[in-house]
Image: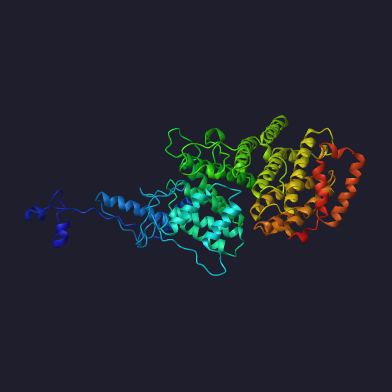
Amino acid sequence: CTECRTRKVKCSKERPSCAQCRHHRIQCIYESKTNRTPLTRAHLTSVEERLTRFETALHRLFPAGNVERIVLSLAQDQNSQLAEIGMPITTPGQTVLPLLPSPPESNQEQVPLTLPGFDDLPCNGQTGSDIQVGWDRFPQTPDMPDENSLVDAFFNNYHPGQPFIHEATFRAEHDRRLSNTPSLAWQILSKSVMAIGAWTLESTDIDLQLYNQAKGLLETIPLMEPGSLTLVQSLMLLHEFAQKRGMQDMSLQYLSVAARMAINIGLHRESGNSTFSLFEREIRNRVWWSLYIFDSCSAKSFGLPLLLPENNFINTSSVMNIHDETLDPTTTSLPPEVNGPTLYSGLISQAKFHLLANSIYRRLIATPCISIAEVQKLEASIDDLRDSCPSYLKGSGSVLESNWLRFAKDRLRICDKNLRILIWRPYLSLWTSRVQSIHDENDVYRESAFRCLHATKGLLALVVDSIRNQRYTRLSASFLLYCLFHATLIYVVFLKAGSSLPESASFVQDIRLIKRVVSQSWIGNDAQVTHFLNVINRLCAPFDTPTALVINQDINSQAESRHPEADTVIPNDPSADSMMTDLLTFDWSSDQ
């Protein structure tokens, strides 16, 4: 017992009390035996392997977070709860760091409230307004733009195409926070806005510095927290920035976290007894449908599953087609919608398009080889959606229209072609695999394959013409580059099926045109261009040589003499053909 060990006398080891303790009339205490872990190499190896498994699991749970800081913050939370109920705290081997540094002392009065539309991140029962960090102002030099210039660049260049942040409210909040200690969520959003603004100005490395600051702040947030609307907006901007900077893996991680956080705070559902104001509801709708479009585009661009739920689980209202000045935080009744173009017309039309596109995409994933009759029904639904578009979103963009309206119109036309390629593409693969029926004009697969080719030619003509006329800023470069890549892959599938296919020589000419456009026009500044050209050169190496081109032309001439109607299965678009003829002779080197 403890007493005998202390007095160094022999203990009789009787229980509940030994002879010595009974004689001295003291309490006899037996301490529990300490189980020590074996200090063997095998045991240490098993512990290291177990730790590695836990670290791997945590990195998968928090792909965009600092795992070590998250674990430390959770341990700190547990210790705080134990202290509140009077339980002893087990001190780990290392000091537990606070989740955020303490706010600096300031004599200025702190304003805890935020303007509507910018909530703050809840953490441990507090709002993000209570969790504050010192405002890390961007260092200014004479040749660098100030913060207001970067915010202006964001709203002038990026915002018209992706209007999910309310400009007037953001600017008012930004000015107010410059004189008060801002919350963590607001800092992340503000730096993300300025990073994209700097990128649109092509300011060397300033955008990356701001992005890294936003990323560093984001890593201090435990992603087990429910999140906030402000943080979802920040993650969407970081997703966009990483994509345009060529960091595709990080871009997809930001999008994944944003999607889960949006569902967690209920952006996909509307409640009749909601306490949100009219303005806050509309901002939430704009954020949700913008995120929905981002998810849809990424899934189809990279061949990934959709992150957001199916359409029947979503009841969020459509964005209102109104002007910004008619709805603000003080509005008490909904303004009437405008029967004409507004800043949100493109967002509304894109949301409707991607609702249809996602239902088609899920259908194709569930059953890749659907019947031709069903494909025709799907294409008819695309026709119906196109016909239902308002008149101000139909046709090609005019030079007299604003840039954002022209982009909204052209993007709809380009997405329409992309979706048609997507639904007919499975039959292109089936037809090219049936070597014996390649020249059979009655083959139904052949007709379907040429429908895919017809949509591809239309897509290529639209995209190349848009690049030639320099209609958009560099923000659209990644979108247009993906469309060119999609068109090139269709041509490659045709060429790999055999050089005797109709128009194979013209396919090689079109691929050469695409490479000239990408390498010699303004789109060549996109971060993904080098990778794009490397992939295309590898895929087209067997066909894009002078010898191969001559052979293809000779074989095509023989094929046309045997099958003069081979290229008339699907009538070509005359405007697309004339446009391509003009573009083939265009001097791209002078269009820098």
Residue 423 image point, x, y percent: 70, 38
Q: In this view, does 110 lie above or below 436?
A: below
Query: Camera-side residue: 432 or 38?
Result: 432
Residue 367 image point, x, y percent: 65, 35
Q: Could you tell whether 402 is left or right of 4 in the image?
A: right
Residue 369 image point, x, y percent: 69, 35
Query: Camera-side residue: 134 or 358?
Result: 134
**Residue that extends furthest to the bottom in the rendered view of this protein:** 142
Residue in view at x 36 percent, y 54 percent: 75
- Residue 485 visible in rendering: yes
Quarter of the picture containing the C terminus is bottom right
Residue 352 image point, x, y percent: 61, 37
Task: Please say which color scheme the image uses.
Answer: rainbow
Q: Could you tell whether 368 is left or right of 30 in the image?
A: right
- Residue 253 visible in rendering: no
Q: Is residue 305 above or below residue 469?
A: above
Quarter of the picture containing the N terminus is bottom left
**Residue that extends furthest to the right in the rendered view of this protein:** 561
How many marks the image carries: the answer is: 0
Residue in view at x 52 percent, y 61 percent: 147
